[in-house]
Image (tube, rainbow, N blue to C red):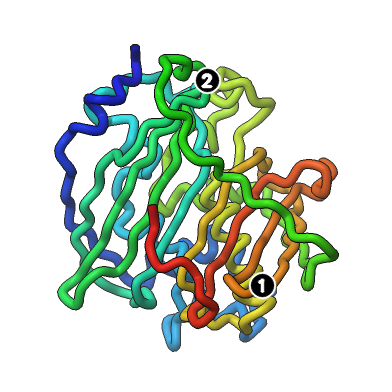
Amino acid sequence: MPVDAPAALAAAPRTERITWDHQDVQLYHLGVGAGVPATDPRELRYVLEAGLRVLPSFATVAGAGVPGVIDGLSRPGVDVDLARVLHGGQRLLVHRPLPPRGTATVTSRITAVHDKGTAAVLVLRREAADADGPLWTDDAEIYVRGEGGWGGERGPSARTPEPAGPPGAVVERRTREDQALLYRLSGDPNPLHADPAFAARAGFDRPLLHGLCTYGLTLKAVVDTLYDGDVTRVREYRARFTGVVYPGESLRVRMWEGPRGVTVTAGAVERGDTRAPVLTGVVGIRGTGATEAAG
């Protein structure tokens, strides 16, 4: 079996040292749609050095190491074709606000392997800390098509039910035709997002936008719309990637505020976003009783 769950779970953790600076943060923000309009002060706070704010989702690319999905496929017990792999979801817990420059030690390991019947789902956890203590914990869910059915644990459902009633806020964000080409410069060179021939081999009409680009774009929409760009309000952000996004499409982001934070969905306007959202998730806000631990 290409996915050997016991071997993947028993493998020793890996540790690496990462660094980043304001230019890495600025590039990431441009990759998730910041800076438009280019003269808007609310956008410039993400792309100018003076008073630079750091979206918590930057943690998913900080240090520009091996992307979580590709990293997970290089672990003992995992030998699969990249063309059969999708990013199924992401969960991020921010222990304190991210600085615009820093150095951290990241420890990573496979913490779960789920049998979904038609697919296997690997959970790769990364824990980052600097000299002052823990910075963030994130879990990447790696969905491997065709590798389930060995009788393993199915694992928890990642579905986030949509709240009753209309959303409290709705915004639209248009992605650029070259959005994936820009975003990949932050450290995810997966050819699925750039090479038409590889995308066709994976069963798609054309290259897809990175799930983590949609993840960051959606978080920015929430922070800008509900919290006036106060990135320090975000404590946790978990999302499931329920569909694909093609560069150039517009995303309609719906938000429902509640006692645990913000329930959010994002859908591709051009393909009937209300019927089939491409992302569903929850943004936990400090001071709202949001979950205090990932996993």
Task: Look at the numbered disc 1 and give the secondary structure of its residue.
Answer: strand
Disc 2: CA contacts within 10 A as few (<14), some (14-19) or many (>=20): some
What residue lies at 72% left-to-right and 68% top-to-bottom? 256
Amino acid at the residue labelled 1? Gly
Q: Name which residue lies at 51% across and 50% down.
A: 212
The percent position of residue 294, horizontal first and vertical second, equals 39, 58
Question: Residue 283 or 131: which is nearer the viewer?
Answer: 283
Say if residue 286 shows up in the picture: yes
Task: Using a 10 Å C-alpha cutoff, classify the residue at mark 1 as few (fewer than 14 neighbours), some (14 to 19) or many (20 or more).
Answer: few
Of the pair 93 and 27, the residue shown nearer to us? 93
Q: Is residue 21 above or below residue 248?
A: below
Counting from the top left corner in percent of width and height, residue 264 is at: 67, 60
Along the line of sight, which residue is nearer the eye, 244 or 124? 124
Q: Residue at x 51, y 45 (%)?
A: 89
The answer to whether any part of residue 35 appears in the image is no
The image quadrant that residue 112 belongs to is top left
Q: Earlier in the sequence, mark 1 or mark 2?
A: 2
Whether residue 139 sits left or right of residue 38 in the image: it is left
Q: Which residue is mark 2?
A: 117
Q: Residue 231: percent from the left, percent from the top? A: 50, 78
Mark 1, residue position: 258
Quadrant for the N terminus in the image: top left
As rendered, which of 158 and 254 lies closer to the eye? 158
